[in-house]
Amino acid sequence: MTDPCSQLRAPEDSGVWKMNMETGESELIFSLAAAARIDYKGKSLADKWNYFNHLLVSPDSSRFIVLHRWRESTGDGPDAEPAGRFTTRMFTVGMDGSDPYILDPSGETSHFIWRDPSHVCAWTKPTGKSSGFYLFRDQSDEVQTVGEGVMTKNGHNTYVPNTDNEWILNDTYPQKESRTQNPYLYHVPSNRVVSLGHFHSPPEYTGEWRCDTHPRNSNDGKSVVIDSPHNEGRQLHMIDISEIVA
């Protein structure tokens, strides 16, 4: 089936949809065209290749996050294609598509997580600041550093359930020489890191074939599961963290 939007830079009929799981009815609530109509640093995005990524609903289901990304083009004709590195900004939007808000306008948004219905923790590089994890208050310009001097590398961050947001689960990409990936816990009040192990990623697991650890918690916050190819290919490994976060 041919994509009807394949040659459109910012289509009106493509974007974030909401579907009723009982009736199957769906509606477009935030289009790529709507996002692209909002200038980036005073410049139009109409001629860029626009797309969305990483959708995540808030804990109270009142708003959602979507990353708005775009790339330059190889030209203006019908054979033009996206080119170069993408730029990213973070939107939060009401569940009916209302009140879209650019929470991180830097162009550098990466991994993120809702801490609670009003706050988002994300790796980014706010204007005038260095790269790192920052805590944003939704629909405001309030932002503060998280894990300064300790969580200094981009990773897949989440808050550990049932810990009053005192613990953050995170990881690292493979180290250059050892190629170890290091999932860890970060204790917010004490600015302390607790390692959960060092897992070797064989060199063949690179690029599109890479295997990030993507650590995630059990619902009770007592266990962590990671992906790792350190032992006979891609496997899931469970780690008990109950004594650490108790």
Image: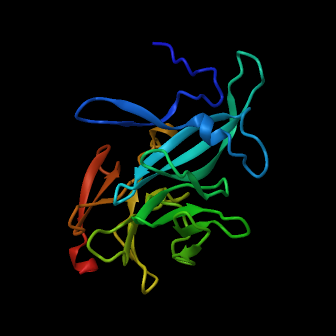
Quarter of the C terminus within the rendering: bottom left
The answer to whether one can see residue 50 in this image is: yes
Judged left or right of residue 62, residue 122 is right
Residue nearest the viewer, comparing 185 with 237: 185
Determine the residue positioned at 38% across, 54% down: 214
Position above or below: 139 against 1: below
Residue 224 sits in quarter: bottom left
Determine the residue positioned at 48% across, 56% down: 179
Judged left or right of residue 71, residue 184 is left
The answer to whether one can see residue 202 in this image is: no
Position above or below: 41 against 24: below
Q: Residue furthest bottom?
A: 190
Quarter of the N terminus within the rendering: top left
Labels in figure, total: 0
Residue nearest the viewer, comparing 92 with 149: 92
Determine the residue positioned at 47% across, 61% down: 172
Q: Residue furthest top?
A: 1
Position above or below: 114 against 65: below
Residue 205 x %, y %? 45, 43
Residue 139 x %, y %? 55, 63
Judged left or right of residue 143, residue 208 is left
Determine the residue positioned at 22% across, 34% down: 22
Residue 129 x %, y %? 69, 70
Residue 91 x %, y %? 55, 52
Residue nearest the viewer, comparing 216 with 77: 77
Position above or below: 153 against 231: below
Residue 126 sits in quarter: bottom right
Residue nearest the viewer, comparing 183 with 65: 65
Q: How is the image coloured?
A: rainbow
